[in-house]
Image (tube, helix red, strand yellow):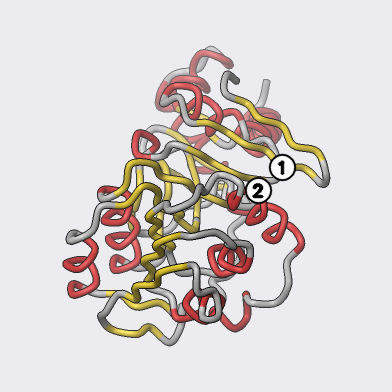
């Protein structure tokens, strides 16, 4: 088989599975490590193919949008948020991360709760819900994300003990959740550390995308709510770390605890 033929196969494999490793290429095609590395160099010159240590991943990464560009109605987010609301119980203490998905979730909260958030958009959705006790974290307001971030915010989070943290997902790969800024990554990590359960909500468009700053590893995630079955590399991590996967497709709900 020629290198061009291998590259066609490898590109299809990475798009289907999310990731390919150097060892896999060597074993599949019975070629040397040097030849496999040359294949990886050529492979990662193709659109969406990103070189990582020991292999390559596929990332059809969407552009980073401001909050205002993301805030239009999204039926997928609406569906995922509605289901996430069913996992919340009376008098739960919640961290609600900033983002359009968590803001959508806030619309569906209608029970006695304690909500701690860094989002003025979430606070706005909750403003007339008197059964919900609200706490807005302090810090520096970020115009791009409409989130309150920074060291002051992190310090405040450490004063709380929550039942659940609802974390918005900027990018999701087999390494976990990554974020576009260090401040956002640190905030997600702090909320997760101070919670008994961590619930992450994302649409399939975020699968096998990766940003600069690591926020949460799979060991820190308890639930993943999404709209399509993740690719194989992510499913392996879900199975290994016993994350409860909830796939909400149109009007059908699939719950996969052993995949």
Can you give x and y, in whole percent of width and height, for residue 70 in the image?
A: 62, 75
Answer above or below: position of 234 versus 120. Answer: above
Placement of 175 over or under 48, stated as above or below: above
243 to 129, vertically: above or below = above
Q: Would residue 251 appear left or right of 245 to someone viewing this image?
A: right
- Quarter of image, res 197: top left
Q: Residue at x 52, y 48 (%)?
A: 88
145 horizontally vs 212: left or right: right
Which residue is painted at 49% across and 51% down in the image?
A: 90
Classify 10 Å Cα crowding around label 2: few (below 14), some (14-19), many (20 and above): some
Rounded to the nearest angstrom, the CA distance separating label 1 from label 2 is 8 Å
Dividing the picture into quadrants, the one containing residue 22 is top left
For disc 1, the marked residue is: 248
For the C terminus, the image quarter is top right
**Residue 222: x percent and y percent?**
44, 36
Question: Which numbered tag is attached to residue 83?
Answer: 2
Query: Which residue lies at the image location 63% right of the left edge and 77% below the top edge?
Result: 71
Cβ–Cβ under 8 Å for marks 1 and 2: yes
């Amino acid at each position: 088989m020629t290198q061009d033929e291998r590259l066609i196969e490898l590109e299809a494999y990475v798009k289907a599975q999310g990731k390919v490793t150097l060892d896999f290429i060597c074993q599949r095609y019975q070629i040397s490590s040097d030849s496999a590395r040359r294949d990886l160099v050529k492979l990662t010159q193709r659109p969406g193919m990103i070189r990582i240590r020991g292999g390559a991943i596929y990332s059809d990464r969407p552009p980073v949008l401001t909050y205002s560009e993301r805030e239009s109605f999204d039926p997928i987010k609406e569906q995922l948020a509605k289901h996430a609301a069913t996992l919340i119980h009376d008098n739960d203490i919640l961290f609600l991360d900033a983002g359009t998905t968590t803001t959508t979730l806030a619309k569906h909260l209608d029970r006695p709760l304690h909500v701690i958030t860094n989002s003025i958009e979430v606070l706005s959705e909750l403003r007339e819900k008197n059964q919900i006790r609200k706490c807005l974290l302090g810090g520096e307001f970020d115009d791009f994300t409409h989130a309150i971030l920074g060291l002051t915010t992190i310090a405040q989070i450490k004063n709380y003990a929550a039942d659940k943290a609802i974390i918005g997902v900027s990018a999701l790969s087999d390494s976990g959740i990554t974020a576009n800024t260090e401040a956002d990554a640190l905030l997600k990590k702090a909320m997760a550390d101070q919670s008994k359960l961590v619930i992450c909500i994302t649409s399939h468009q975020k699968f096998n995308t990766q940003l600069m700053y690591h926020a949460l590893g799979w060991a820190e995630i308890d639930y993943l709510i999404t709209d399509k079955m993740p690719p194989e590399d992510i499913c392996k991590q879900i199975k290994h770390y016993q994350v409860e996967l909830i796939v909400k497709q149109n009007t059908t709900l699939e719950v996969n605890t052993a995949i």
